[in-house]
């Protein structure tokens, strides 16, 4: 099963949208509905964490949460629970239009999560709306993302299944996301990380016409590529960090994020903040919602956090296929940063 870029795409580059204070390109899929952003009024100090899936989103949410609350979030709640994914489809919040009301009542500094590209997330700034909104973009080696995404998909529990493939009230059609049990059957009794790799690289989502890959979720290369596309265009309220930076120097990165977000945290609580942002501490969090959404709760959701597990599986052809695909979304320097966390 090999599919390299078609001759109609080969040599071309993905065309990206530029940031605007509104949604220019709405996305409606099995999991996403970006129309909710149209009802969210930005606050002056909002934070938006924009990442591909499985790139360190939960980790970054926890860091921001620990900084905001000086290491003591209310009721020991995780950053993930305090930082809503605005575009995720939820039967309760969407059907009753409660999300804007709920987040509008937050008494703390809001921080949102996003797995959408530029143009599908509103870009707020002092220049375009008078609001000092801050963005954090997180990158990770795409190959590591796929291995982590495989674990994520296979760990989905009943609550997650219930919130997937919900029909739209207006009858909008979308590509159905297969459950892990269906993929196990499709692949003859076992669904491996390599199977997830092949699906992601060889098939796209029809409603995401800009992309050529990403099934059964979306193109994570498209998402990070859209943010890297504007990195050197003068948008100074966007911070770019890499998963490897967090792994290599967590204390230093926490301090850099605090400085960027202008959070004057209690330095006497830094050791507590740092401990609470370690993988061990995050995996041991207890949450009834996570237990229902993921088999094993946070222990399975956060999983290993290690990189390079793909090295014993992917061959030269697989790497060539990935490089060719990545070059549609990014230039060589951007691909190098995505793989290493270092700029050439």
Image: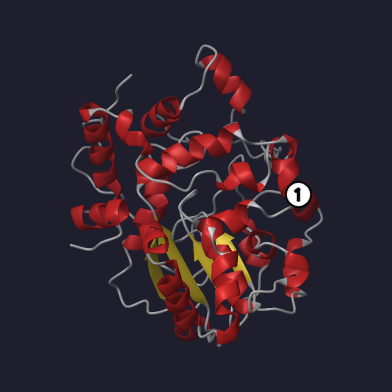
Q: Name the residue: 45% across, 85% down.
A: 127
Would residue 320 be found to the left or right of residue 283 on screen?
left
Q: Which residue is mark 1?
A: 289
- Tell me the residue at 73%/53% (across/down): 286
Image position, residue 276 (x, y; %): 60, 65
Image: 288 above or below 202: below
As drawn, is 245 to the left or to the right of 173?
left
Judge by depth and name the residue closer to the eye, 92 or 49: 49
Question: In the displayed structure, would residue 338 be above or below residue 194?
Answer: below
**In front of the other: 56 or 223:** 56
Rendering coords of residue 344 (x, y %): 17, 62
Q: Considering only vertical position in the picture, is 31 above or below 35?
A: above
Badge 1 element? helix
The image shows residue 83 at horizontal and vertical percentages of 64, 64
Res 343 quadrant in image: bottom left
Q: Position of residue 340 (x, y in %)?
A: 28, 54
């Amino acid at each position: 099963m090999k599919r390299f870029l078609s001759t109609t795409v080969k040599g071309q580059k993905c065309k990206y949208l530029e940031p605007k204070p509104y949604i220019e390109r709405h996305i409606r899929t099995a999991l996403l509905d970006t129309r909710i952003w149209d009802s969210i009024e930005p606050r002056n100090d909002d934070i938006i964490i924009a990442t591909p899936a499985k790139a360190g989103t939960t980790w970054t949410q926890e860091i921001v949460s620990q900084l905001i609350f000086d290491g003591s979030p209310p009721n020991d709640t995780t950053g993930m629970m305090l930082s809503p994914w605005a575009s995720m489809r939820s039967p309760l919040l969407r059907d009753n239009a409660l999300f804007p009301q709920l987040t509008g009542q937050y008494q703390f500094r809001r921080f949102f999560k996003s797995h959408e590209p530029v143009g599908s997330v509103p870009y707020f700034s002092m220049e375009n709306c008078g609001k000092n909104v801050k963005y954090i973009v997180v990158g990770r080696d795409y190959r590591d993302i796929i291995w982590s995404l495989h674990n994520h998909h296979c760990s989905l529990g009943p609550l997650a299944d219930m919130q997937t493939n919900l029909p739209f009230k207006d009858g909008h059609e979308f590509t159905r996301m297969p459950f892990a049990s269906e993929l196990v059957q499709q692949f003859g009794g076992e669904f491996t990380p390599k199977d997830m790799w092949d699906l992601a690289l060889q098939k796209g989502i029809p409603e995401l016409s800009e992309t050529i890959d990403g099934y059964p979720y979306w193109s994570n290369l498209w998402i990070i590529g859209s943010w890297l596309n504007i990195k050197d265009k003068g948008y100074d309220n966007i911070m770019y960090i890499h998963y490897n930076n967090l792994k290599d120097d967590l204390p230093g990165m926490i301090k850099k994020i605090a400085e960027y977000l202008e959070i004057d945290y209690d330095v006497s609580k830094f050791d507590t903040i740092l401990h609470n942002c370690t993988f061990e501490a995050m995996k041991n969090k207890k949450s009834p919602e996570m237990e229902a959404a993921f088999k094993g709760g946070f222990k399975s959701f956060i999983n290993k956090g290690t990189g390079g597990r793909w090295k014993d599986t992917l061959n030269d052809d697989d790497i060539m296929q990935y490089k060719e695909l990545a070059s549609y979304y990014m230039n060589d320097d951007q691909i190098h940063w995505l793989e290493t966390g270092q700029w050439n």
